[in-house]
Image (cartoon, grey):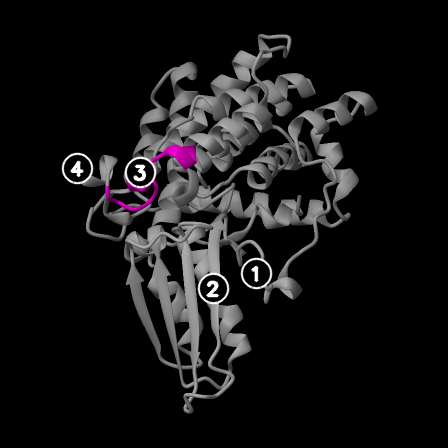
Amino acid sequence: MKSLKELYKIGKGPSSSHTMGPNKAAKFFAERHPEAIGFEVTLYGSLAATGKGHMTDVAIIEALRPVAPVKILWEPTIFLPFHPNGMKFKALYAEAGDARNEEWMVYSVGGGALSEGEGATSLLASHTSADIYPLTTLTDILDWCNHHGRGYWEYVKECESSDIWDYLMEVWQAMQAAVERGLDSEGALPGPLNLPRKATTYLVKASGYKQSLQSRGLVYAYALAVSEENASGGTIVTAPTCGSSGVLPGVLYHLSRGHQFSDTRILHALATAGIFGNVVKQNASISGADVGCQGEVGVACAMASAAACQLFGGSPAQIEYAAEMGLEHHLGMTCDPMCGLVQIPCIERNAFAATRALDSNLYAAFSDGKHRVSFDQVVRVMKQTGHDLPSLYKETSEGGLAKI
């Protein structure tokens, strides 16, 4: 598994797979062809089906246009076998026989990450970080924790370079800033849905309730704030994706304010959450176009569940149980955004997943950590379930809520 720096990326929304990934690929291709007279980019499958709503073309043109004019071709009915989010870049030069007229096939596989597919000659090799985590399943990592008497965050400390804590502090600061910007913003989100922001309203209403309901309302407000920032193209942190970026910050912001957890403990919780997200990214997928929203909001809920359970003193077994529930109870969730926008149902799902994470923590805390279904087993089931879902329920806007 790669560094948590590859999981937690600070960038602009609304989509890690549809905007951050394509923008990154376009920048790389532009660097290879600084003298091209034009570019042609073909988008396939889910990337083409909801690309306009996610501003995929804007992200690509932004990176390529300083070099040369760009033509975007849309192929929403062609699903390539490696991944639904395929892109083909062409560099154009004056002479038809010019060897620099290169074609490059690349895939945006979720969380802003890129892949050239199986067996491809990797142009990205020099831009790809090495694997640094020798253990890649939760079962093995849990065994390591039990054997050494340590926590998940200490496994992160064991494998990462010492600057990981500085980076996670940047992540935490970006998460807090996204919450606070979202709470201060009002008005409609961009796009044809004219969806009004709700975070501020939820914050105000929550303050009028008694403690138990107030707590729940505040979590809604914080998660909504980040998700609405993402939907408006604001700066957020992939956790593990842009579309699910409100869950973990919503939970951590609430716990840091409501229970006075120190920044150090929050960073440890972020590290633990990252381990669970990384395991899913390594062994299944965090791409809605590949496995549905279970891979985005479901994984975010698992990460937040693990983080909350650690903050409240859960054992490694209880933390694993909390994360397992967070993911298990999102199995089968489709990715069916209306108008291809990361708004309906995405924003509400973030708010509900944040509170479900707190419930998963509480349920696990009442247990001894023993349970029948492991986190790794749920990850395998999630991958299979996602691949069994018809494409119209995986970020194509062809089925489900997208057709209402």
Residue under circle 2?
105
Q: Nearer the viewer, residue 101 or 397?
A: 101
Q: Position of residue 347 (x, y in %)?
A: 34, 38
Check disc 4 and give the amino acid type: Ile
The residue at which mark 1 appears reads as: 120
Q: Mark number for residue 155?
A: none
Amino acid at circle 1: Ala
Instruction: Write the start and end of the magenta stretch as one range.
Output: 386-398
Q: Which residue is mark 4?
A: 404
| Mark 1 neighbour class, 10 Å CA radius: few under 14, some 14 to 19, many 20 or more | few
| Alpha-carbon span between mark 2 and mark 4 | 34 Å
**What kind of residue is marked 3?**
Tyr
Asked if residue 148 is positioned above or below residue 97 in the image, the reply reads: above
Which of labels 3 and 2 is toward the front? 2
Q: Secondary structure at mark 4?
A: loop
Q: Earlier in the sequence, mark 2 or mark 4?
A: 2
Residue 63: within the magenta? no
Determine whether the residue tagged by mark 2 lies in a helix, strand or loop.
Answer: strand
- Distance Cα–Cα, label 3 vs label 2: 25 Å
Residue sitting nearer the eye, 17 or 366: 17
Note whether 87 is above or below 296 in the view shown.
below
